Amino acid sequence: MALNDDNIVMPVAPMNGGGFGGSFGGDWGWIILLLLFAGGGWGNGFGGGMDMYPWLNQSNQMQDGFTSQMLNNSVNGIQNAVTSGFGDVQTALCGGFAGVNATVNGAQNGITSQMYNETIANLERSFAAQTANTAAITGIQSQLSQCCCDNRLATVETQNIVQAEGSATRLAIQNQTQQILDKMCQQEIDALKAQNLALQNQVNMQNLAASQATQTAQLIADNTAQTQYIVNRVAPYPIPAYVVANPVTPSI
């Protein structure tokens, strides 16, 4: 609070004027008038008896001079005392209001500092709440993202398992089919081998029979020739002109 605040009326009177109306004519004017009336009475009482011969007796003028001097001194003393007193009062008031102003300023500074601290605290709480909300939202988003990733991973793993099982099933079917085909082929091959073997045996038997027949015929022919030679050598007989078959020799 300042002494020159436009919104506050200060109860302080100006120095050398103020509530006493200046030097004269103010609230102390009646004291001066009383003193003047008293001076007039003294002049009439003490010097009035010589008014008949004013050139012989000038004591009234001297008395008026002393009275005026006394009045002036008294008024000056009163004025100085009043001025000094009210100056001290004004100084004290100024000092008091300066202290009040300092106290108010201190209080205002304290209130301002408290409001500033409360504002900072509110901002910090708001920031902490926003940070917590952001962290919570981020955590939820992370959980959702992780959940989606886990679901996609589980789906991919399931697809891989299904594909692997399908591949294994197809491979098993192919292997079994190939085994069946191989078995059928082997059976056909074995049948062909058996047939070939039978045919080969048959051919061999026929060849053997033919060979044996040939060998037998050769042996018979050789034996017949040798027998005929022996007969011819042992007992010669006439050779007919017309050769006929021996009825004793078996026909082949």
Image (tube, helix red, strand yellow):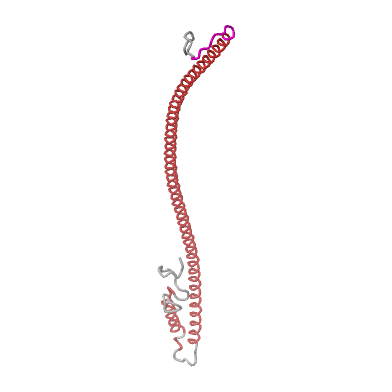
Up-down: is 12 above or below 231? below
Frontmost residue, 145 versus 53? 145
**Residue at (47%, 64%) from the top-left corner?**
101
Up-down: is 149 above or below 64? above
Frontmost residue, 167 versus 3? 167
**Residue at (46%, 88%) from the top-left corner?**
50
Rendered location of residue 122, percent (x, y) = 44, 53
* Extreme residue in the bottom direction: 55
Q: Quadrant of residue 35?
A: bottom left
Position of 36 with respect to 230 (left or right) is: left
Q: Quadrant of the N terminus?
A: bottom left
Q: Count every numbered label the image shows and give the total.
A: 0
Rendered location of residue 173, percent (x, y) = 42, 30
* Extreme residue in the right direction: 233
In the rendered image, residue 239 lying in the magenta stretch gets the answer yes
* Extreme residue in the top direction: 235
Rendered location of residue 128, percent (x, y) = 46, 50
Q: Quadrant of residue 21?
A: bottom left
Position of 151 with respect to 234 (left or right) is: left
Q: Quadrant of residue 169?
A: top left
In the rendered image, residue 119 lying in the magenta stretch gets the answer no
Frontmost residue, 129 versus 194? 194
Up-down: is 116 above or below 70? above
Q: Which residues are magenta?
A: 232-242
Frontmost residue, 239 versus 215? 239
Up-down: is 146 above or below 183? below
Q: Main secondary structure of the magenta part?
A: loop
